[in-house]
Amino acid sequence: MQKMLETLEKLQNEAISEIESVDTIDGLESWRIAYLGSKGRLKGVMPLMKDVSREEKPAVGKRLNEVKKALEGAFETRKNGLSFVATSRPPLDITETGDPTALGRRHVISRTIDEITQVFSRMGFSVAYGPEVEDEYHNFNALNIPDDHPARDPIDNFFVDGGRMLRSQTSTVQIRVMEAVEPPVKIIAIGRVYRPDTHDATHFSMFHQCEGLFVAPKVSMVDLKSTLFQFAKAYFGEEAEVRFRPSFFPFTEPSAEVDMKMKIKGKWQWVEIGGCGLVDPDVFDQVGYDNEKWQGFAFGLGIERIAMLKYGIQDIRWLFENDARFLRQF
């Protein structure tokens, strides 16, 4: 019994001493939790009651209640004092004009995507989307990229568990669309793609692509060039031009690199902006299209490259640093 009474006396003295130095509401709440909370020090002495004899329990219980009331009284007194200090400060004038807030604006990449989408929408293209985490079939096999192709090298892709990967091109969306719908098809696929490139002024490990696909009877390279020619005129101005340079892509045959002639810093220049070609018949076989009845063209454009050319941006990294001083220019 004596040990229990001494413990209660010590606890009360320490609690009263500590609360006298508390000078904030937060500090007072911390004190309450420490001494009166469900896991506080006062609750912590309760297990000691088992060592008190039956005859002595009433006296010890009475003292325990006295300590509890003393601590609760000290808490209320101190709370009222701190509340008076807080309310005695000058009131906040809620009618006072605050700091002006600037209007936000869309990121230059989002603006570029919207602008490109609007141009192709006027030509009858709808927008399609697909998953950014893909399987190798949709990212490679269905696009006629064989197992030994260098593009499938692990050092050139982001592979994840379960044989899946972050897509390296939005051509995967073209495959998924053709698997889901019967031709004719006229879509653009816009989204993020991922490649483990070293970051520099013209490379980034995540960037955006716009891929186009048109499937119909008797589609030719003339239709493809006409489409990209109209895009160049609508997006870069009436004096813009398009030219094709022969190239190779596994999923198109014939294939070409796309150059556009556009005005950069007041001077017209030829600039490569993507690749294109007629859809390879093997790709149609993969999705169950009759390649004797249907033909198609596909093209791919780099969103960041188009934005950089149109707005005179010299470093792709600036697009992802989110420096408001840079972004407010566009």
Image (cartoon, grey):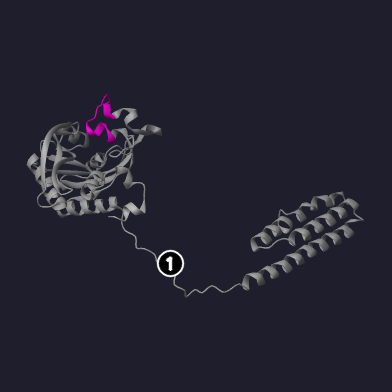
Vertical position of residue 308 compared to residue 281: above or below: below
Locate the C terminus by quadrant. bottom left
Locate residue 26: give its quadrant.
Answer: bottom right
Residue at 20% from the left image edge and 37% from the top image edge: 288
Magenta stretch bounds: 138-151
Magenta stretch holds residue 32:
no
Please report the residue visible at 73 percent of the width from the left and 59 percent of the height from the top.
36
On whether residue 140 falls in the magenta region, the answer is yes
Quarter of the image for residue 316 reads top left
Residue 1 appears in the figure: no
Q: Is residue 321 visible?
A: yes
Q: Residue at x 89, y 59 (%)?
A: 59
> Which image quarter: residue 149?
top left
Front-lying residue, 12 or 124: 12
Left of 197 or right of it: where is 272? left
Q: Position of residue 60 (x, y in %)?
A: 87, 57
